[in-house]
Amino acid sequence: MAPHTEQLTRPAVQLRGLTRSFEGRTVLDGIDLDLPAGQFTALLGHSGSGKSTLLRAVAGLDHAVAGSGQLTAPDRVSVVFQDSRLLPWRRVLDNVLLGLDGKDADSKGREALEEVGLKGRERAWPNELSGGEAQRAALARSLVREPELLLADEPFGALDALTRIRMHALLRELWVRHRPSVLLVTHDVDEAIVLADRVLVLEEGRIGLDLTIDRPHPRSYRDPLLGEYRERL
Ligand code: ADP
Ligand code: MG
């Protein structure tokens, strides 16, 4: 097989026996998981089930998991959190460009802001943005890094219901256009079903349920198909 073909078929994320405990309490108990490249996956689980711990491990932000199992992830990984984590003393465009250089960085940053619907807000300060706009900026900051894997930890958790629905449309649109692998952590069952092609449930330190969302894909909260999937969770 040619090397480039191998790369296309290799899963973007591969976890084998991943374990993590805090003060003797096991939170992740030997997780095995493959995320195929380009797939949109949602991770559900009740509060405290270890979703953020798993996401941090996949992001490479948790050095304590090293050696506890096997973890393979792409080089370019972006993470979006519930709070935008924009630096308040930098303008929106400068936040998006943080740490990037190269002469086309500026135009790429502007392009990313346009893609998320923030054209014209390049020079705004983070505290001049609404919650939804700040999350748009956080998405632009991720996007401009051309991630192979986008990790999102309850990115819409702090937004009102209507803004959330608009953000769903935006995230799905960005995913269709750029096709990163996505792992979206959420505690909102409907959000998981509407956005993802696969829904995982984390329970007792393991992936307790792995549900594929078939076509036709429920696309809105009003879709009757949503109820059918909800019953299977
Ligand atoms: P979730 O994101 O699903 O709500 P977390 O991954 O944040 O859950 O947490 C899972 C469990 O691990 C919780 O009981 C939490 O208290 C514990 N935990 C997470 N991070 C730490 C830490 N740095 N130190 C001690 N306990 C932690
Ligand atoms: Mg969490």
Image: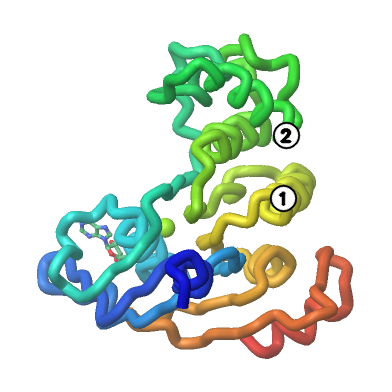
51 or 68, nearer to the observer: 68
Mark 2: is the Cβ under 8 angstroms from ligand 2? no
Callout 2, which amino acid? Answer: Glu
User: Label 1: which residue?
Assistant: 177
Q: Which mark is residue 138?
A: none
Tell me which corner region of the image, top left, top right, bottom left or bottom right, holds residue 126: top right
- Of all residues, the one furthest to the front in this rendering is 2
State left or right for residue 49 relative to residue 158: left
Q: Is there any visible trace of residue 116 in the rendered image? A: yes
Callout 1, which amino acid? Answer: Arg
State left or right for residue 140 relative to residue 85: right
Residue drawn at 59 percent across, 24 percent down: 109
Q: Are marks 2 and 1 in contact (CB under 8 Å)?
A: yes
Residue drawn at 53 percent across, 53 percent down: 154
User: How has the structure been colored for display?
Assistant: rainbow
- Residue 148, position in %: x, y? 50, 53
Mark pair 2, 1: CA separation: 10 Å
Q: Residues within 10 Å of mark 2 (few under 14, many from 20)?
A: some
8 or 92, nearer to the observer: 8
State left or right for residue 29 relative to residue 219: left
Residue drawn at 60 percent across, 26 percent down: 108
Q: Is residue 153 above or below residue 193?
A: above
- Residue 186, position in %: x, y? 55, 62
Q: Residues within 10 Å of mark 1 (few under 14, many from 20)?
A: few
Q: Secondary structure at mark 1?
A: helix
User: Label 2: which residue?
Assistant: 115
Tell me which corner region of the image, top left, top right, bottom left or bottom right, holds residue 15: bottom left
- Residue 224, position in %: x, y? 88, 78
Q: Is residue 123 above or below residue 225?
A: above
